[in-house]
Image: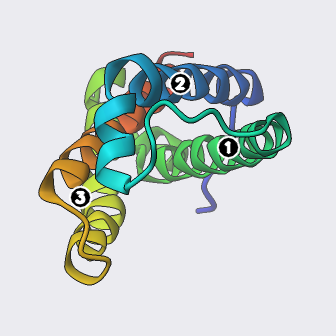
Amino acid sequence: MMPNIQINLLAVAIAVVAHFILGFLWYTPLFGKAWAKEMGFDPNAKPPSGAMTKGIIIMVVGNFFLAYVLAHNMAVWNPVTWGQTSTMTPASLAGSSAFFTWLGFFVPVDLGVVAWEQKSWKLFGINTSYHLLSLVLVAMILAYM
């Protein structure tokens, strides 16, 4: 049996925007100064507008890849995609997808930053908690739309 993978592109688009807003809030008013200090940046310095525009474009593209691939992975692991019945709720599908994606793909990279780039555990905490929260946000949007 072949899976019936359907990806809701409207949900992906909404997830991209929500992820972008979360990133702005996380790395600006919530943890911007602490993150900049841990990265060795001047927290009061403003990047040139060209750098901001380039960063925004790259971030939107990255957010799209994350949302689209997570939607695909969620569909593949959903028994309904394979023509079977499921007792899985959208919340449990989203939560397990977000958690295991974070644990298997984000945490190892974040740990590598501490081990090999000699960044602080504080920076690890800021970044890895953002990665988990962003995955949960995106997965919830994808699961409920």
Along the viewing direction, whichever of 87 and 99 lies nearer the viewer: 99
Identify the residue position indicated by label 2 in the image: 24
Along the viewing direction, whichever of 145 and 107 lies nearer the viewer: 107
Along the viewing direction, whichever of 25 and 83 lies nearer the viewer: 25
Quarter of the view holding residue 60? top right
Identify the residue position indicated by label 3 in the image: 103
Whether residue 74 is visible, yes or no, is yes
Q: Type of residue at label 3? A: Leu
Identify the residue shown where x is 37% and y is 54%: 39
Instruction: Residue 98: give its label.
Output: none
Q: CA distance from mark 1 to mark 3?
A: 22 Å
Q: Secondary structure at mark 1?
A: helix
Residue 8, percent from left and from top: 70, 29
The vertical placement of 20 against 64, above or below, is above
Q: Earlier in the sequence, mark 1 or mark 3?
A: 1
Q: Type of residue at label 2? A: Phe
Identify the residue shown where x is 77% and y is 45%: 51
